[in-house]
Image: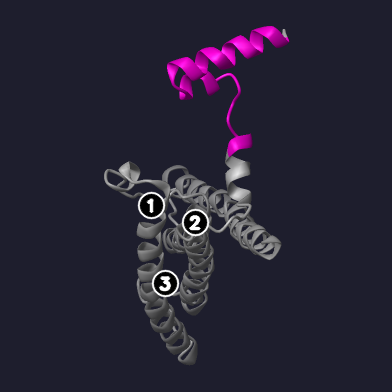
Amino acid sequence: MVWVTRYLVAQDGLSEFVGRAISWLTLGMIAVLMIEIVFRYFLDSPTTWAHESSTMLYGAFCMLAGCYTLRHRGHVRSEVIWGALPRRGQAFCDVIIWSVGLAVLSIFLKLSVAFAAESWAVLEYSNKSVWQPAVYPIKTVIPVAVGLVMLQNIAELVRAILTLFNVDYNDPRETEYESDIDPELLPSMLDGDVAEAVDTGASRKR
């Protein structure tokens, strides 16, 4: 199943790239807010653009971060029942979740594309301030973000299906998480007997 591993590496890489790229938007938000603070409280001359600019930057950041968060399994979820199930039982639940998620995201994508297209058709501008910036670029971010989450959702669905049917494949994310574990903290993450064995083995190596 080499092709599956290559696909997962490519998809995870895309979500990772997007997440790391848009993280720089936080610096933009900080810069805009700092400028507003200086102009408002030190120069007594508040700007007309800072509030909406920071709002649009934050909106783009939150939406585009969805695929990165999903790639790192960072979304909030309840594991009370899921965590008590065997591996294939968890995979069965995941197949249902990702299938429903894919259907919902498909609807969102269709609606968001129409929403953005309508905004572009009239070259929509904001009426919330005297600055009146164009809003069709930020509305375009919505279908892009939904599409990116859909792509990562498909990758998660593939993982769940393969696990459910006991198909042997190499999940690059699992080895990645294993390498992220601090060896010094490993004994505290294991059962007492296993931790003792790890400590004993480490002592022998010394």
User: Which circle's residue, 2 or 1, is located before the other in the chain?
Assistant: 1
Disc 1, SS: helix
Please report whichever mark, 1 or 3, sits nearer to the chain's N-terminal start.
Answer: 1
Q: Residue at x 33, y 50 (%)?
A: 77
Q: How far apart are marks 2 and 1 (CA)?
A: 9 Å
Which dot marks residue 102? 3
What's the magenta region?
178-205
Q: Which amino acid lies under the numbered mark 3 shown in the image of this protein? A: Leu
Residue kind at label 1, given as amino acid type: Gln
User: How many numbered dots are placed on residues in this image?
Assistant: 3
The answer to the question of whether label 3 and label 2 lie on touching residues, with beta carbons closer than 8 A, is no
Q: Report which residue position mark 2 lands on.
A: 163
Q: Can you give x and y, in whole percent of width and height, for residue 185 in the image?
A: 54, 21
User: Would residue 63 be visible to someone looking at this image?
Assistant: yes
Q: Residue 143 carries which label?
A: none
Q: Which of marks 3 and 2 is in front?
A: 2
